[in-house]
């Protein structure tokens, strides 16, 4: 039987075979025991959590176990879902395919046919046009010999590009 007062709790209990009641008048002991039990339970719970986290970090679980599957799932979720929320800035650089407007059309025998955009060629005379074509093609193909070239015109007669037949000197 419990009796409560504002200062302490009194527990009345009698021993078997005894008519004399026993009094415990230590309110702090009971509260201390309850608090100690809560702290111990909390510490045990937290230590189990830290043990699980530590085992995940050190990868100590056997393959095929529940915790192993959880770790693999977390890794896969990280790999596939984080790019949606985190910008890693790892996109490929945007590449303009023909910065100088040079396209290798078709290799023909020992010669290669290069198609060069007319904007890359600034000369007006035959010698200037040849010099500009070689200047544009050599950084791409190395040392070359320009056999001949022809202007490619659009439907209105404007020069759109040049086709140049080049070979490598042996």
Image: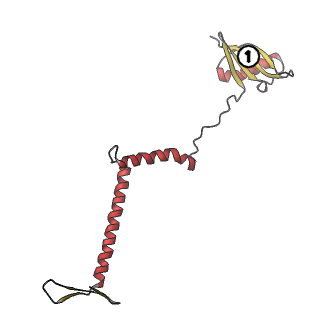
Q: Residue at x 56, y 50 (%)?
A: 85
What's the colour scheme? secondary structure
Local packing at callout 1 (Cα closer than 10 Å; few below 14, some 14-19, many 20+) is: many
Residue 152, percent across and down?
Answer: 79, 19
Left/right of residue 141 with respect to residue 12 in the rendered view: right
Residue 64: quadrant of the picture: top left
Q: Using the image, determine if residue 33 lies above or below residue 109.
A: below
Residue at image coords 73%, 16%? 164
Vertical order, 62 against 33 (above or below): above
Q: Is residue 38 left or right of residue 13?
A: right
Q: Nearer the viewer, residue 111 or 125?
A: 111
Q: Position of residue 149 (x, y in %)?
A: 76, 15
Observer-nearest of 83 and 8: 8
Quarter holding the C terminus is top right
Label total for image: 1
Query: In the figure, 132 relative to 34: above or below?
Result: above
Residue 97, position in %: x, y?
A: 67, 29
Q: Quarter of the image holding residue 145?
A: top right
Residue farthest right in this picture: 156
* Residue 65, above or below 138: below
Q: Nearer the viewer, residue 147 or 69?
A: 69
Report helix, strand or loop for mark 1.
strand
Determine the residue positioned at 34% across, 56% down.
51
* Residue occupying image coordinates x 37% and y 51%: 56
On-image quarter of the N terminus: bottom left
Instruction: Determine whether, in the image, residue 124 is placed left or right of residue 80.
Output: right
Quadrant assignment, res 16: bottom left
**Residue tagged by mark 1?**
164
């Amino acid at each position: 039987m419990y009796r409560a007062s504002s200062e302490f709790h009194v527990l009345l209990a009698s021993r078997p075979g005894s008519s004399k009641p026993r009094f415990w008048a230590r309110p702090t002991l009971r509260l201390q025991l309850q608090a100690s039990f809560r702290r111990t339970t909390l510490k045990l719970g937290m230590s189990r959590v830290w043990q699980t986290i530590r085992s995940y970090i050190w990868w100590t679980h056997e393959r095929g176990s529940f915790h192993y599957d959880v770790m693999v799932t977390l890794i896969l979720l990280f790999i596939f879902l984080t790019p949606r929320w985190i910008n890693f800035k790892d996109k490929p650089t945007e590449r303009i395919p023909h910065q100088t407007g040079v396209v290798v059309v078709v290799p023909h025998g020992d010669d290669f046919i290069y198609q060069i955009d007319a904007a890359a060629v600034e000369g007006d005379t035959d010698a200037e046009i040849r010099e500009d074509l070689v200047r544009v093609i050599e950084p791409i193909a190395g040392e070359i010999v320009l056999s001949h070239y022809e202007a490619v015109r659009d439907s209105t007669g404007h020069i759109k590009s040049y086709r140049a037949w080049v070979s490598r000197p042996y």
